[in-house]
Image (cartoon, helix red, strand yellow):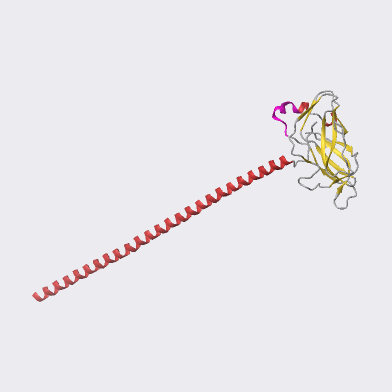
């Protein structure tokens, strides 16, 4: 009986030992499993943080790039506007459109001299004609404007001037860099003129290309209709019709 009780006690002790070992093993497994999970979470957080930083850097770079692009666009627009203003200042226009002075904006339409109300005669108010044969420097061909209407009118700005050659070629003259002033013509007055600066060359020139004028089309400032005049002086002009700043150009209406 005693031996049997001892055997039962040993078996119970063994079972308790096995339970203890199992609990320890479970504890070990639990401990060892949570540590990698925690490490993995920290690593993932680190990756997320790194990813966020990278995205932030990309966004900053993109925003910086967008800012740079916007700045470049603004600079380009500013440069383009400056170029247009510079060209206008140097006389790039070939039409008869002119900005109206602010002070005269309200009355300019009613008082402007219209094409049909003006007379056009070669020779300025002070006479004179260009030397188309022996000149070696710039010449001036002037057209006198006379108010043939019944009321006083004004002229302000550049006229449109187109030369037509004997072979049918056309040349729209560019503008000078002179600043226009307002000219007032009372009925019958002829104190205003259109002045064409030109470079005359021999009509049979072999070294340069001559433009032999036949007719001249004149459009007064801000008008849309023109008159056609015959070219009376003969000779030829150095053909610079394709040049940006030719030696032949038109000045604003003046004295």
Q: Which residues are magenta?
A: 99-108
Percent across and percent down for residue 202 are: 89, 47
Q: Inspect this view and state whether residue 1 appears.
A: no
Q: Nearer the viewer, residue 174 or 96?
A: 174
Percent across and percent down for residue 107 are: 74, 26
Above/below status of 36 relative to 173: below
Q: Quadrant of the N terminus?
A: bottom left
Which quarter of the figure has residue 86? top right
Q: Main secondary structure of the magenta part?
A: helix
- Asked whether residue 104 is drawn in magenta, I would say yes
Tell me if 182 is positioned left or right of 13 in this view. right
Q: Nearer the viewer, residue 39 or 224?
A: 224
* Residue at x-position 69% and y-position 41%: 85
Above/below status of 208 relative to 215: below
Image label count: 0
- Asked whether residue 45 is drawn in magenta, I would say no
Which quarter of the figure has residue 222? top right
* Residue at x-position 45% and y-position 57%: 51
Which quarter of the figure has residue 96? top right
Q: Nearer the viewer, residue 140 or 186?
A: 140
């Amino acid at each position: 009986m005693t031996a049997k009780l001892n055997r039962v006690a040993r078996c119970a002790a063994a079972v308790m030992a096995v339970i203890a070992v199992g609990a320890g093993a479970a504890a070990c497994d639990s401990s060892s499993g949570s540590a990698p999970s925690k490490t993995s979470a920290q690593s993932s957080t680190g990756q997320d943080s790194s990813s966020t930083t990278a995205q932030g850097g990309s966004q900053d770079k993109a925003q910086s790039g967008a800012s740079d692009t916007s700045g470049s666009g603004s600079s380009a627009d500013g440069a383009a506007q400056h170029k247009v203003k510079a060209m206008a200042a140097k006389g790039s226009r070939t039409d008869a459109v002119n900005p109206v002075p602010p002070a005269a904006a309200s009355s300019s339409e009613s008082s402007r001299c219209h094409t049909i109300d003006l007379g056009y005669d070669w020779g300025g108010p002070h006479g004179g004609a260009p030397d188309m044969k022996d000149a070696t420097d710039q010449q001036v061909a002037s057209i006198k404007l006379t108010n043939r209407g019944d009321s006083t009118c004004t002229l302000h700005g550049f006229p449109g001037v187109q030369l037509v050659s004997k072979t049918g070629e056309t040349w729209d003259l560019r503008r000078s860099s002179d600043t226009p002033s307002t000219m007032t013509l009372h009925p019958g007055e002829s104190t205003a003129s259109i002045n064409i600066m030109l470079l005359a060359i021999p009509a049979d020139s072999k070294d340069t290309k001559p433009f032999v004028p036949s007719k001249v089309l004149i459009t007064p400032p801000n008008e849309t209709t023109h008159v056609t005049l015959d070219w009376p002086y003969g000779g030829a002009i150095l053909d610079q019709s394709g040049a940006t700043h030719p030696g032949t150009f038109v000045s604003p209406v003046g004295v």
